[in-house]
Amino acid sequence: KSLKEATVILGQQTLSNLIYTLAVLGNYKDGPDSAEQNEMALSYDAVWRHSLYAACLARVTGEQHKLDGGNLFTAGLFQQLGLIVLDSYNSELFANILEHAKKEGTSLLASTKSVAGINYLDLSHSALEYWHFPLEVCEIIKNLQLNNDSTETSILNTSSIVAEAFGFNLASCAHPEALKTGTIAAIFPDTDLALEVLAKGDRLYSQLATEFLG
């Protein structure tokens, strides 16, 4: 009911992350009208739904590993932002990337590199830096781009793949080639823990999806 109440309940960092999120969604929520008529046009709604689910799962998984869930949530939500930046800049080029991904069965990360010679995660990182997002969030995206061996990177990669597996499809948006051997087993050492984290992530997505996506 008030900013003070929101700060008390959510915490300052979570509230800040929500403000960042809604500000960017205001510019990139709907996407081009052609997305409804052309299967080779990028669906912004699909980007946000996939990203939001991955972000929710990354947050609860990160908290399970005693990491900053708020920063992981924000990084997970905006890791695909480079796709939208690229599509906004050159939709024809992006249509070729989508066609390549579907034809070859590769991820958008791999197809963007093959067709455009660009790592869209680099665009995501640059955009967040330009908008002065927290350095910690920018660093997570940078490490994701470099595909280092950090737990945060592994959590984000795994969250994207789980989101894809659960039906939040975006032309093979997830990038399994980025996962190291044994990564999933390290993050989810037993089945009960995996199911618990997935249930929490699913509940969080259900709570947030209406507010963010309508």
Image: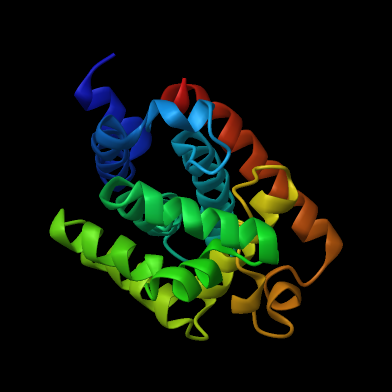
- Residue 139 pos. (x, y %): 31, 72
Whether 67 is drawn above or below 117: the answer is: above
Q: Looking at the image, which is closer to me, 122 or 192?
A: 122
What residue is rendered at 72% in x and 42% in y? 167
Query: Residue 72: x, y in percent?
Result: 43, 59
Colour theme:
rainbow
In the foreground, 1 or 150:
150
Horizontal relation, residue 137 to residue 189: left or right: left
User: Which image quarter is the N terminus in?
Assistant: top left
Q: Position of residue 95 (x, y in %)?
A: 47, 50
* Whole-percent x, y for residue 172 in the image: 64, 57
Residue 173 occupies quadrant:
bottom right
Find the residue positioned furthest to the right.
191
Above or below, 153 against 160 in this view is: below
* Residue found at x 57% / y 67%: 157
Asked if residue 197 can be seen in this view, the reply is: no
Q: Nearer the viewer, residue 41 or 164?
A: 41
Residue placed most toward the observer, 64 or 212: 212
Q: Name the residue located 36 percent from the left edge and 31 percent from the top edge.
A: 29
Side (left or right) of 50 relative to 92: right
- Horizontally, residue 82 falls left or right of residue 24, namely right
Which quarter of the picture shows residue 7? top left
How many numbered marks does the figure carry?
Answer: 0
Residue situated furthest top in the rendering: 1
Q: Give me the residue at 56% from left, 45% from top.
A: 50
Question: Can residue 46 be seen in this snapshot?
Answer: yes
